Image (cartoon, rainbow, N blue to C red):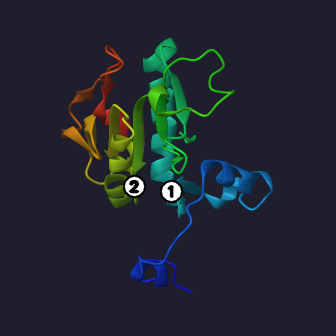
């Protein structure tokens, strides 16, 4: 059965759909309908399968985790592959979110857009998804800065200044440069380190 681009619902967008809420999505996990092995995220009220993680992606996540924790220090919480609740129908799981410091490290509540300083996605095979779906979603919810680490191109797409469903400033930064998140002045990150 084909549920992809040529699926019946995709070809017939006029068919009424009922989006899931974040609460219903969480309940599906609580009762065992979904497990961590399912690798899905809630986007626009629909379950979206996340790309498989290969060694290049996971190695980049490992290296960047070590670097971000050191560079960010006490000025933020480095959240690795955890959810952000953007609204009642969107709970993506970015590779990284740097969050405002909070005494309980977000044990009591899932981070919301106002808690986010920076979101980073590592794009090994999901570059189109990150650009076409994640970027406008993050912009629409006011995430101040979004980076796409494009492993294939050897560059980082830096998106800043959300305006509607896009970012007013988008730059592609190459291996020889350094990045400094707007919300974390002095947190200098060499692009070469991000790319491995």
Where does residue 161 sit, x and y in percent of width and height?
25, 32
Find numbered disc 1 in the image and state the secondary structure of the residue it sits on. loop
Up/down of 6 relative to 64, above or below = below
Residue, disc 1:
54
The structure residue drawn at horizontal position 62% and vertical position 22%, both measured from the top left corner, is: 105
Relative placement, left or right, of 187 versus 102 is left
Up/down of 128 relative to 182, above or below = below
17 or 100, which lies in front?
17
Residue 81's label in the rendered image is none
Where does residue 193 sit, x and y in percent of width and height?
35, 33
Quarter that holds the C terminus: top left
Where does residue 162 sit, x and y in percent of width and height?
28, 36
The structure residue drawn at horizontal position 41% and vertical position 76%, both measured from the top left corner, is: 13
Is residue 195 something one can see in this rendering?
Answer: no
The structure residue drawn at horizontal position 35% and vertical position 43%, both measured from the top left corner, is: 140
Q: Quadrant of residue 148?
A: top left
């Amino acid at each position: 059965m084909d549920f992809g681009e040529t699926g019946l619902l995709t070809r017939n967008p006029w068919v009424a759909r009922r989006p899931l809420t974040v609460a219903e999505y969480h309940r599906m996990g609580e009762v065992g309908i979904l497990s961590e092995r399912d690798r899905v995220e809630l986007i626009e009220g629909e379950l979206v399968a996340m790309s498989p993680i290969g060694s290049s992606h996971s190695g980049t996540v490992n290296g960047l985790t070590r670097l971000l924790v050191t560079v960010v220090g006490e000025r933020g919480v480095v959240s690795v592959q955890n959810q952000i609740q953007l609204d009642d129908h969107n709970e993506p799981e970015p590779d990284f979110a740097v969050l405002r410091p909070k005494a309980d490290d977000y044990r009591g509540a899932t981070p919301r857009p106002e808690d986010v300083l920076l979101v980073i996605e590592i794009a090994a095979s999901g570059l189109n998804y990150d650009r076409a779906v994640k970027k406008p979603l993050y912009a629409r919810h006011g995430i101040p800065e979004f980076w796409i680490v494009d492993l294939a191109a050897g560059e980082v797409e830096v998106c800043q200044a959300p305006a509607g469903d896009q970012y007013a400033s988008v730059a592609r930064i190459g291996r020889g440069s350094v990045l400094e998140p707007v919300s974390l002045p002095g947190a200098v990150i060499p692009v070469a380190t991000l790319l491995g």
